[in-house]
Image (cartoon, grey):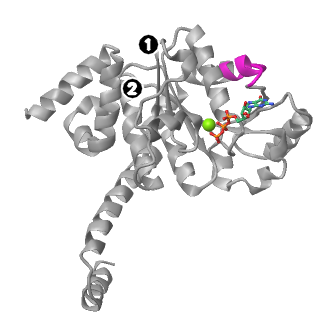
Amino acid sequence: MSASQSSVAKLLESAKRGEQPALARLLTVLEAEGPALLAQFPELLQPTRMAFRVGITGPPGAGKSTLISRLIGEWRTRGLRVGVLAVDPSSPFSHGAILGDRIRYTEFATDREVFIRSLGTRGSTGGLSASAWLMVRAFDIAGYDVVLMETVGVGQNELEIMNVADHVSVVLTPESGDGVQGMKAGLMEIARLFVVNKADRPDAERFQRELEAALEYDAQPRTVLCVSALHGRGVHELAQALEAVRVSGDWVSARNSQARWRAEARALLMIDAERKARIRASQIETLGDFATLMRELKASV
Ligand SMILES: Nc1nc2c(ncn2[C@@H]2O[C@H](COP(=O)(O)OP(=O)(O)OP(=O)(O)O)[C@@H](O)[C@H]2O)c(=O)[nH]1
Ligand SMILES: [Mg+2]
């Protein structure tokens, strides 16, 4: 076993014992060297325990972070260990990443069973997705019960990231109204639960009914809940709905489904292809080089 291999093995042991600095380091190592580690350590590839991954997505400012901090509290009162991966670079959770810091939500700063990590803005958005796939495995190893993943549900990349989750909730607000029509079709399909947040504002129930009507003829049963994350209303019911899914264990077999392995493979292959493309492109200096590249491309199609 090489030196770095044995140090990663030690890191895995420490993370398993619940040591937070080891988990922080493991997340960093996984982000940097993930595929190699997955190949070397079977427990990373096929963990014996799995954290339930809950994707929380929705338009900017819908209240995702506020809701997540409430949900952390709900799970903590049940004695569960909660991780957060904030994928959206504009999130308040992520400011720490910009400062090069691991941050914890202030309320939970002294709670050793809560671990919050933001995904940096390094690299492309495709890179974020690959990082999410790799890093989220650290929470399985460390024996966490739940990982909440926050992303702004606007583009294709964010949608890709939600493949990492075992369950996706979409957070909307009464003002989202027409937004439902405009919402990415893929997001509507992937979502199992819709949260109408800011229900302290007018028209929340009307919007809830509209949403239920829009989902009525859908093959997948979906739940729509009205919540006010700011005031803590409806949060308990939401946590109960998510907890029911977690304990049902229905998501465990899906974790090993063809679709999930393919989605993870796609994310990691794309980042690898991007890295190779950058190297190859940096070698192009003249029209002749470019023409050679075009011949190579034609040959490889
Ligand atoms: N009235 C009301 N305001 C809320 C509620 N939940 C969140 N907010 C407010 O909405 C604003 C955005 O909340 P965040 O939790 O940062 O929303 P977000 O979806 O995480 O935002 P981004 O990560 O920037 O996309 C904040 O000013 C919150 O205080 C709610 O239930 N009611
Ligand atoms: Mg946020």
Task: Compare residues 259 and 241 and report the one nearer the observer.
Answer: 241
Residue 152 vs 269, above or below: the answer is: above
Question: 50 left or right of 91?
Answer: left
Q: Which residue is mark 2?
A: 140
Question: 166 left or right of 16?
Answer: right
Task: Compare residues 116 and 17 and report the one nearer the observer.
Answer: 116
Residue 62 position within the rendered picture, expressed as x and y whole percent measured from the top left: 72, 39
What kind of element bears circle 2? helix
Task: Compare residues 223 and 1 and report the one nearer the observer.
Answer: 1
The quarter of the displayed image where residue 292 is located:
bottom left
Q: Residue drawn at (36%, 19%), measured in percent from left and top?
A: 20
Q: Residue drawn at (36%, 56%), measured in percent from left and top?
A: 271
Residue 170 position within the rendered picture, expressed as x and y whole percent measured from the top left: 68, 39
Can you tell which mark lies on residue 286?
A: none
The amino acid type found where label 2 is placed reads Asp
For the residues carrying marks 2 and 1, which lies nearer the camera in this image?
1
Residue extent of the magenta highlight: 230-239
The amino acid type found where label 1 is placed reads Arg
